[in-house]
Structures are given as C-alpha cells and as structure tokens.
Amino acid sequence: MFEQLQAGMVQQGVLLRELEETIRKQDRLSTRLCGLIFLIRKLPRTAGADCGVRATPEMLADLLVSDLTNDGTKLRKDVPVALQKLMDEGILLKDGDEYNLQTKESQEWDKEFRNRQTEISGNESVVHQKRDALLQAALQKEINTVRLKQGASNEPRELVLHFAPEPPDATGQNVPVWVRNEWNASQKNMVDAARAAGTDSPILFVFVPKASAAELRQQIIRAEAARGTIDGKGVPTTREGDEARSSMGTRLSDAERTRDQLIGQIAGGAKVYKGGGTEMFNLTLAEKVREGAIDALARLFPRFNEADHKAWTSVINRARNGDDSPLRAVDYEGTTEQHPVCKEILGKIGSGIEGRELRKFFAASPYGWPQDAVDGGIIALHAGAHLLARYNGQALAVGQLDQNKISRTEFRTENIIIRPEDKLKLRGLFVDAGIAAKASDDLEAKSAEYLTLAETLAGKAGGAAPLPEAPKTTKLSDLRARAGNDRLKGLLDEADALKPEVAKWKKQAELAAKRVPEWEKLQKFLTAGAGVGALAEAETAAQGVVDGRLLLDNFDHVPPLLKQAAQALRTAVTAAHGAFAKRHAELLAELETSEAWQRISSAQRITIMSEEGISSVPDLEVGSDEQLLSTLQHTPVSAWNDKTAALTARFQNAARKAARLLEPKTQYVTLKSGTLRTEADVKAWLGAQETTLVAKLKEGPVVVG
C-alpha cells in the first residue's frame, strides 16, 4: 500500500520529500518498516474510530508477513534488530512501546541528544561521579535493610558506610563499613587492608568488583544525555514537539531502567571481608553484612557484656527511692562502687565531667554501653554519696538526680581538702596578678581566670625574632586540665614559682607593646629603601637585633637605627627626586624648542603631556618620618631612578605625537647603532642611513631618533 501511495502522498504534501528520500535509501526490510510505520501513525485514534493497530515490534512483524509458513519466526527475530538500527541512525524514534518516523522537530531533539551524548562521553569525570553516586546509593539502600541489635538489652546499632580512600575511624559508636570498588581500587589492595587491620578490627571491608563496565557507562551517558535534552528543550508547544519529548522520555526511562538493573547486579555482587581478611559467603549482600556486623560488634565493643542487662531502669528507680542495694536488679550483690560499670564511671569522672560527656564516652568503643546502664550507674553512685552533682550551678541532693538532668549535670569525686589558709594564699596569688578575689568568690572560677591571664601574658612576652622566645606554658596547660580542688592544690604547689614568673611576663609584655610598633616602622623603612647603599649599616645592625633576639633587651636598639635609616632615606630620595626634576627640565626645554611643538596649540600640548605623564614634577614631602615613609611606600628610591630613566622615551613620544598632529604620515625612524673604527666605516654607515631615510621619505615626513 505504501509503495502504491508513495508518489501521490509526496505530491499532496502528506509525505515530506526529505522523509520519502530517507525511506527510499534504506535496505528492503527497513524501507518496508518505515513505510508501514508511516501508514499506521496516520490511522485515526479517536474514540470509535481507533482500530487498535500500533507500531509495536510485534504488530509490525505480523503485518510484514507475506508467507504464513516461513516469514513469522524470521521477522520476529529481524524486526527488533532493524528497528534498533533505525533508531541509532536517527531515522526512527520510540514513543512508549511504539515507533515513529523522525519529524523535523524530533530530529532537533535527537541532534541535541547526540551532541550531549558526545560531550558526556568525552568527560569521564562526569561518568565516574554519576557511577559512584549510583553505586553508593544502591549499596546504602541494600545495607539499610540490615537491622542490628546487640545483647540481652537489645541495644540498637547502626552501620555507617565509608566511601573515602582512607580507612574509617574504628573507635566510634557505629560499625564502620569501608566500601571500595574496582574502578577506584584493586581487590588485592582491599584484601591486604583487611588482613593488615587484624582480627581485632571492627571494620567491615566491602569490595565491589567491576562488571558490565562498558554497558553501564553507555547507559549512564544515555540517561544523562536524555535528561539534559529534556531539561534543555523545555516544554514544547506543538504536537510534533510533544511527540519528540515523549520519545525522549522513553529513551530516558529505558536507559535508567537498564542502568539501575546493572547497578543492582554490580552492587549485589559485592564481596565482604571481616578484619583479618576472612570473606563472607552468604547468598545476598545484606546477609553477608549482617553476619559480618555481628562479629564486628564484638570487636568494636569488647566490654559491652559488663553492662548488658535488661533491668537497668529498675536500678534507676531503686536508687532514686533510697534502696541501699539498687544493683541487685542487675544480679549484683557487691558494693556499688565496685560494680564494673560504676567503677569505670568513677575512674572517668575524676575531678569533674559533664553527664553528656560521660554518656558519649561510654557509648563509644570499647564500651558501647546502653544509656540506661550508664545513667543507672551514675544515679546509683550519686545515691550512695560517691559522687557530687551540680545542676545549673546548684548542688543536687540524693534523690534529686534523674535521667533528664544527667546531660547538663556536672559530676565530680572530691577527695582533696582546701584549708582556710590555703584559700587566703590563693586569693593573694590572684590579686598580685591583677585579678580581684573576694572571700565570697568561687576560687575555681578565679583559677581559670588566672590561668587565662598568665597564658595571655606569656604569649605577649615573646614570640618570633627579634622578640625572645615565648615562655613555655606547659605547666599552665597541665593545671588547666585539672579541675576543682585538684587544680587549686596544683596552683598552691606552684604558687611560689608562678608569682615571679607572671610578674616578669607582664613586664615583658608591656615592653613589647611599646617596642614592636617601632620595630615594624624600621622594617618598613628598610623595605622601602631596598638597594640604597647608605642603609647597609642600619640593615646589618637590624639583622643583629633579629639574630640575637634583642628587641626586649635592657638597651633599646631601635630608636638610633630608626633615626639613621630615616636620615639615609631622606637624603637618597631627595637626591633621586632632584635628578628627576633636573632631567625633566632639560627634556622639557629641548621639547619646547622643536618646530612641531611650537606649531601645535596650547591645548594640544597639555593633552599630550598629560597622556605621557610629564605635565609636571610631583612634589616631595619628607619633612616628618611619617611623610617620608608614606612617600617611600608610594614611590621607593629605586622607582625614582626608573622614572628618571623613562623620561627620555616619554618626551620622545610627546615629540612624535606633536609631529603626527601636523603631519599624520610622519614616521619615526631610529638610526642603526654600530661600532665605527675608520673614516671608511663612518662613510659606509652614513650611506646606509641615507638610503634608509630617503626610502622612508617616499612614505611621508621623517623624524629621526
């Protein structure tokens, strides 16, 4: 039917001539397919008129059968291949399950798609990033199905995936899962890392082998190109555009479906190793990870069993209600402070710690204790008078501590006694340092203020050369790390040594505050005067101050050096400025005598001199040291010499511009230089220059330079 109607449809404009030529150029099967698809797409689809015929591979194969005995099987095999070939060549497009011939609009969409495909193919980093993101998402989704609980207390645990090249931290609250893939690492390296970590490591090592790499790359590129085309083209306004967008949506969904299937297969083939290198051989990735994680929990929390019990809430209730043996609820008959949990808590608290820090510490490796166990131990110890607790600055009596207050409560064990005479001595230490300390003041808070002040003074009492080295503050750091009466006792022990040291640091800090600004001013002078010979002596002396770190010496070395440097620089810059002014005057007088300069207008002269930056000689302000430094920072001595050297060229340019204003064709000719030893050399040189100048005169007036 198509072949019979083909010529008439072209004449009537039903079939575009370009489309007809495209169909005619195909092989026999492809030509028949294109013609059949064209006719099917012309069938009405309105309600009541739709016959249900569609351009799907199955219907196309059925409609192409001419020999019922032999054609069917072969066509069902050949038609999908031919359709894919026509799609790849941009002749057909796919719209859902159907095929259609490319229109001009769909060809534009296809061209955009292919351009994006080519662009993405040439940018491997985009493909790699997308592939890694898809793999990570697939692995995360699979591993998120694993639910972990540990021990009789059913403590929930989490698996945390780590995709970086470096191994994860193995001391936190969660089981680390280190994931690498064969695109970024080798299986040998991953197995070696697992073996090197050892059998005590709680890390799970997951390696994703490379599979279907080329096909995955192709589908990622197709999906990204299709999505980019849809986003870039926007919403069409024509029927042909809607068909093209729908076809591109089909490409996108096909590519994403195939891509995601490949990603799922690749992720499902991941290998899992425990620390030490033992591989898990369960059927699915989730099962491998679950079994490995159970073993990893024992490695991550080797002390978990010490607190693993379901009845810690009963311990809390008993302790708050005044029970003398609250730990019987967890089958313990000994003294409270000797229970493994309570003993560890006391050791961690020392002289003071907040409840939130206690919880965090015991939730991490090697403990992994349930929060109820930690809270039960704390409340039992407080009830038994083994702990002091302060909530919002107020001491809590026995029975007042509950789980809601623990995170913001400060705990301490107190074994050190500060006597009245000790407190008096401490207040004296603080007052000598300049810190007011009354009898009613909190000495611990004042001790922190004192240590901060001492560290600040030490930092200001020295530093980088030429300052002396900053005093060592290790002793202060050690004291700051202590708390409560423990810190106060340490300050008492060190008071006799700290008192003169702090006084010395204070004196040095005050001296540095005065001398450092003057030293910095001297450095600015020396920098601005680089290359000035008269500064050599001052530079040598300044280097001596640096080498000897003498800035805080009993004798102040800076003022005489500052005076010497300023005097040398003032003389040097004044001389350089004078040379500039003299040369400017000489060249200006020479310019003013030239014929061209005299013939141009005053306004033209002003413009030219402004353009060349030779209108005037800038003033020089060097009366005070501040003016001198400002002048040198704007124009160093060496810059004045450069400016003077540049004057000749600037005035020559001015002369050329004046000549060109009078004679637009004026040329500037520079005579060649050379070494002349004899009279013959002179005549030869003159002859050559004459030839050059005469030749140039044919092109216009000449100015010789």
Image (cartoon, rainbow, N blue to C red):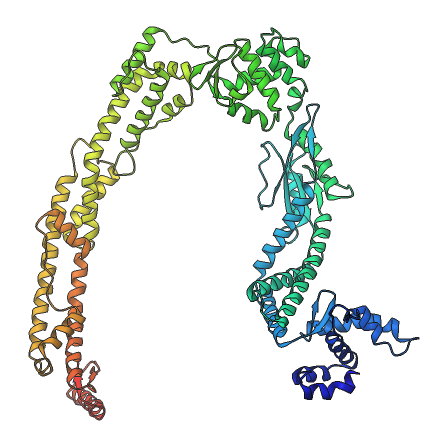
Q: In this view, does 104 lie above or below 398?
A: below
Camera-side residue: 111 or 539?
111
Camera-side residue: 680 or 168?
168
| Residue 66 rendering spot, x and y as whole percentages | 88, 79
| Residue 595 rendering spot, x and y as whole percentages | 8, 83
**Number of dots carrying numbers:** 0
| Residue 547 makes an appearance in the image | yes
Q: In which quarter of the image is the C terminus?
A: bottom left
> Which residue appears at 36% of the width and 7% of the height?
419
| Residue 24, picture quadrant | bottom right
Residue at the extreme right of the image, as rendered: 69
| Residue 339 makes an appearance in the image | no
Is 346 placed left or right of 328 in the picture?
Answer: left
Is 154 placed left or right of 381 in the picture?
Answer: right
Q: Is residue 122 above or below residue 437?
A: below
> Which residue appears at 15% of the width and 72% of the height?
648
Q: In which quarter of the image is the N terminus?
A: bottom right
| Residue 638, picture quadrant | bottom left
> Which residue appears at 62% of the width and 24% of the height?
370
Camera-side residue: 107 or 673?
107
Camera-side residue: 163 or 253?
253
| Residue 32 rendering spot, x and y as whole percentages | 78, 80
Residue at the extreme front of the image, as rendered: 48
